[in-house]
Image (cartoon, rainbow, N blue to C red):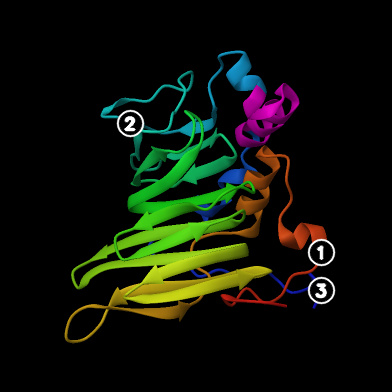
Amino acid sequence: MSDRHAERHELQGRSEAELLWFQRRSVIQAAAAWVSMGGIGAALAQGRSNIVELTGDAMVNGKQLLPTQQIQTGDTVETGPKSNLIFVLGSTSMQMRQNSRMTVERGGSLNAVSVLRLITGGVASVWGKGRTRQISMPTLTAGIRGTGVYAEVFKEASGERSYFCNCYGVVDVVAAGTRSTLEAQYHKAVIAQPKAGGGFELESAKALNHTDEEQEFLARLLGQRTAWQVSGQKSNKDGKGGY
């Protein structure tokens, strides 16, 4: 199917405006400056910040995060209300939504992420090819190879739900004692949520709270393109993963 299909997403606790952050002039300018500067390699060589965009308030290791700082592996990062944080760490680009908290654990080097541990909130990310890394959530763990994904933790009275969308590529997911391989050309989503009688169950899900443009933006920061940009094809954004 061609990209004549309109992209659709469902919102849960988010406004349409929050999903349109990439349209702000400041973000477009920041991305252009990042790419023209030479990306993460140039930032590290010049001792510059790896933060591409920061709006609102964010904390790193319990202290106020400044746009001139560098976020490193081992750091715990938290965003406040109406905040948006975009940064690049090694071969991974990330966009944290408001009211989110995560830790980026160190891999084989200072700038290599081994585990993105999402505690609450939502984060979109694009990962360059390499050895398997992980996204860890309260009720779900995903093994990342080289792909674009969106993860979100929903905290509700009935318990936590871990939502995960493999936007493109191949991801191994473990949740509720079940191991699944998610292979997607265009958004394949699952959710691990409480079940009646206790425990959790892994179910298929629709595409929630993220857009194609976000993934394209994050891929560009790494000098990459998404699967649908490469193929020139999209399908209905129903969370099933194929054309």
| Residue type pointed to by label 3 | Ser
Task: Using a 10 Å C-alpha cutoff, classify the residue at mark 1 as few (fewer than 14 neighbours), some (14 to 19) or many (20 or more).
Answer: few
State the extent of the magenta-drawn residues as a range: 26-41
Q: Is residue 111 above or below residue 48?
A: below
Name the side, left or right, on which 56 lies relative to 189. Answer: left
Taking the image as drawn, is residue 14 in sight?
A: no
The Cα atoms of the two marked residues, 3 and 1, are separated by 10 Å
Q: Are marks 3 and 1 in contact (CB under 8 Å)?
A: no
The Cα atoms of the two marked residues, 3 and 2, are separated by 42 Å
Q: Which mark is residue 176?
A: none
Please report the residue visible at 40 percent of the width from the left and 59 percent of the height from the top: 152
Between residues 214 and 13, which one lies in front from this camera angle?
214
Q: What residue would you read off at disc 1?
A: 231
Taking the image as drawn, is residue 188 in sight?
A: yes
Magenta-span inclusion, residue 96: no
User: Mark 1 or mark 3, which is nearer the start of the sequence?
Assistant: 3
Q: Quadrant of residue 91?
A: top right
Q: Are marks 3 and 2 in contact (CB under 8 Å)?
A: no
Name the side, left or right, on which 114 lies relative to 43. Answer: left
| Residue type pointed to by label 1 | Ser
Q: Nearer the viewer, mark 3 or mark 1?
A: 1
Q: What residue would you read off at disc 2?
A: 59
Locate the C terminus by quadrant. Answer: bottom right
Which element type, helix, strand or loop, lies under badge 2? strand
Task: Using a 10 Å C-alpha cutoff, classify the residue at mark 2 as few (fewer than 14 neighbours), some (14 to 19) or many (20 or more).
Answer: some
Q: What residue would you read off at disc 3?
A: 2
Which element type, helix, strand or loop, lies under badge 3? loop
Secondary structure mostly seen in magenta is helix
